[in-house]
Amino acid sequence: CAHGLPRSSRFSRGTSSARAATIVASALPMLILPHAASAPNGVEVHTPKTTCVDDGEVSTDAEGAGSEQDLEFQDVADRRRLLAAVARELRGRAAGRRPASCLMAFHGAQAPDIDIEDYLMRISKYYLCTDSCLVLGLIYVDRLLAKRPDFEVCNLNVHRLIATSIMCAAKFHDDTSWANSYYGKVVGITTCELNWLEKEFLHLVRWSLHVPLDEYNEYAGRVLAGAQSSGMS
């Protein structure tokens, strides 16, 4: 791995990418986010739909790689605490921020029914990405905010924002990644819109996806501290 972070596949080496995606997609509960507040011509958007989230764990054979801050958890309760800590970080970035007066690509017409913590659980379960990608996704969001101070995180855009950020992290960091059509089914966004969001996100962060190990460890330590304060074993 280029930056020395924990990296592994959530499936055994004998499981092909296509077969892995098929196995998981067969158990994927439906989710559709409220339609985007603004979209360019040709981008298909969804209409609102109520969702149901399954809290179970995907059955996989994980092979974790060690590092200074190895975030690969096998215990479902520990992963939930980790996700709760990441969700708190995201809520903190949205706290006290007013909705942006200028609608950007990530804004929905209304806030999704699904809570950000449950949304992160769904992403963690079905993206099949390493837990390190959750931290990388948070780092990328902060990079966007640093490069675009006018961007306001709020309940209208945080779901699309973190879904795109973690997807970019998985593609850049993990050994295995999936087609946007699959990621879109996980996060409730059409493939066409997700393609657009990915392009916009990379433009906003200026294609800066490399994370030095010290920066990663700083974020991972903070997230782990938050998770441990919630009772992580």
Image (spheres, grey):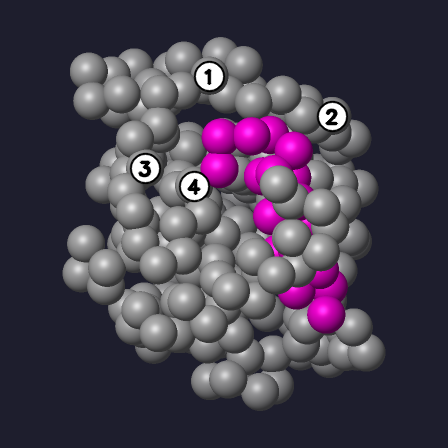
User: Alpha-carbon neighbours of circle 1 within 10 Å: few (<14), some, or many (≥20)?
Assistant: few
- Mark 3–mark 2 distance (CA, rounded to whole Å): 30 Å
- Amino acid on which the number 1 mark rests in the picture: Ser
Picture coordinates of residue 163, whole percent (x, y):
53, 50
**Magenta includes 80?**
yes
The residue that mark 3 highlights is 64
- Mark 4–mark 3 distance (CA, rounded to whole Å): 6 Å
The residue that mark 1 highlights is 59
Picture coordinates of residue 207, whole percent (x, y):
30, 71
**Magenta includes 54?**
no
Q: Residue at x 48, y 62 (%)?
A: 220
The residue that mark 2 highlights is 52
- Mark 2–mark 4 distance (CA, rounded to whole Å): 26 Å
Q: Is residue 200 left or right of residue 36?
A: left
Q: Is residue 118 left or right of residue 120?
A: right
Q: Earlier in the sequence, mark 4 or mark 3?
A: 3
Q: Secondary structure at mark 2?
A: loop
The residue that mark 4 highlights is 72
Q: Residue at x 23, y 41 (%)?
A: 175
